[in-house]
Amino acid sequence: MQGAIARVCVVVAAAILNHPLLFPQENATSAVEQDAELMARMRQHEERLARERAKMEEALSQPEEGAWEEAYSWYVWSALSFAVFLAVEMCRADAADWNGGGVDDELPESGCVDATSMALDKDVLANFCDKSTYGHAHDTGRAREFAEGFVDDLLESLRSVCDREADMEVEDFVGMGSMFESWQMCKPPVCDFIVPFSPPDPLAFQVSLWCDPSSDVPPDRRGCGTIRVSRPGDPEGGCLCGSANMGEDMLCLLHANQLHAYLDPRGSSLLAKGGVMAWFQVALTKAWGRISHKYDFEVTFRSLDTAGALKIRFPSGKAMMVNIIPAVQLADTDAYLVSHFPSDCGGPPDPFWPLSLAVYERNLLKHLARPLPQPSCHLHCLQVVTFLHRKQTALTGGNALLDYHWKTVVLHLLLLHPPPAWAADRTECRLRDILGFMHRSLREKRLHHVLIGNHRVPGELRLPETIRRAEPVNLFRSLVLRRDQYANTVRHLQEMMRNAAMLLQEYTPLLSNRGFHY
């Protein structure tokens, strides 16, 4: 057996030492000649193995003691030698490809600014927090109160212009986002509202999430769901032509795959965002036309492609942004499938609707804030990083980071750190933690949704079990394939940390003039 092992080791050593990429010759031949030499050596290696196999087969035919053990050892060492030979070939080929111009998209190590070495002046930081606190609650409260009254009046007018037997039924709005979580810093103020809608009788919506056991949502659409329109006795949905006097508008909505491509061509009963948003845009325009005489301000649509994106301009010259987002509520929950997110210009294609857990996120923020020392620094930290993010974006251009990503990081850290760590005098430490967490998330291209599949979420939130037990959803998934966007985002974060002290010092005096006026 020792002889067989020695012969195999000689073959392996010869194969490795004779490999053309291990010790390249000074006068390298052409690629064709190298391939020919490589194939010749591989044939020689196969011939050696064949001769050794013939010897072992001959030994197997003789009933000598220990012959079976030697044959078995030969086969093991033959397989091992061949594996080593292939491994050397693959590794050297990969190395040659990398040296030929491969791109490394990892975070740069030279010249990096990390959260621990970032320059922050405690006095400037304290001054910023003071400026953002004094008058902020009053201004936010006035803006929120005005927006709620306006949207309530607008939706009441919308209901009056809709056909109750044919159009969607619009329900009461739900406030969401930074304005309703008391950390908004943007100017002009922005108010986001979810407006649930339901189909006319006798139709119903059947929602299917990506995490449902019987879901047909593909794996690359995590965090999304589909909405099927069904009628009594037909839970699977289907063609609704002739089932009721639906009216022309509803017929277009349910059969857009035949008329305007509003629905998924794979099934006429799947509701598409495009059809709903087109209907909602027209309905809002009619609704504002009925009540515009009551107000002395101007209302315009900021985008014809995004339903409910309104801009209000007051006689004083001040402005306010209002986003009214159509949505379908999941039964017996505070979760919604929305047509779009206000900060996301893209979104999944039809017929997939993104899931919004904004109500649960607001409740989680309130729940985690209760045991914190008063005053606490969690909202100040969130205001600082979103302020820096917006100012740096204005300087260096667009990137993949959103205010929502920063809120997600803060919520993750609130779940990790004990309440005493969020005292007001720990603002600088927590701010460095937030920036460090985002830095690591970008390096790994992974930032998980704070609620989906997170075992740290307290049970008091009563999050639906299917969402609690789902696999975590990576909010940075798009950065894995979009290298240009990833590089821009990395540079943005680096410049933001490098310029943090300057931005805070330069723009803090302006915060006192940011009040909301009609």
Image: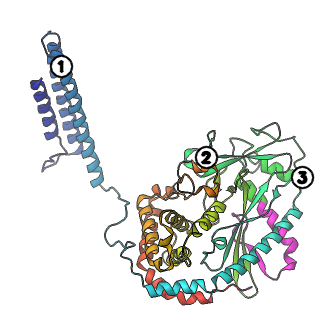
Q: Residue at 60%, 78% (x, y): give it.
A: 186
The residue tagged 2 is 210
Q: Secondary structure at mark 1?
A: helix
194 relative to 431 in the view: left or right: right
Q: Crowding near pointer 1: few (<14 within 10 Å), some, many (20+)?
A: few
Against 224, is 180 above or below? below
Q: Is mark 2 in CB contact (under 8 Å) with mark 3?
A: no
Q: Crowding near pointer 3: few (<14 within 10 Å), some, many (20+)?
A: some
369 relative to 331 in the view: left or right: left
Taking depth in this image into account, of 382 and 420 the one nearest to the observer is 420
- Residue type pointed to by label 1: Glu
Residue 425 visible here = yes
Pick whichever of labels 2 and 3 is earlier in the sequence: 3
Residue 390 locus on image (x, y percent): 54, 76
Residue 322 locus on image (x, y percent): 71, 72
Q: Nearer the viewer, mark 1 or mark 3?
A: 1
The residue tagged 1 is 69
- Residue type pointed to by label 2: Trp
The residue tagged 3 is 165
The reply to whether the magenta stretch includes residue 298 is: yes
The reply to whether the magenta stretch includes residue 170 is: no
173 relative to 449 in the view: left or right: right
Q: Crowding near pointer 2: few (<14 within 10 Å), some, many (20+)?
A: many
448 relative to 66 in the view: left or right: right
Q: Secondary structure at mark 2?
A: loop
Q: Nearer the viewer, mark 2 or mark 3?
A: 2
Which residues are drawn in magenta?
280-308
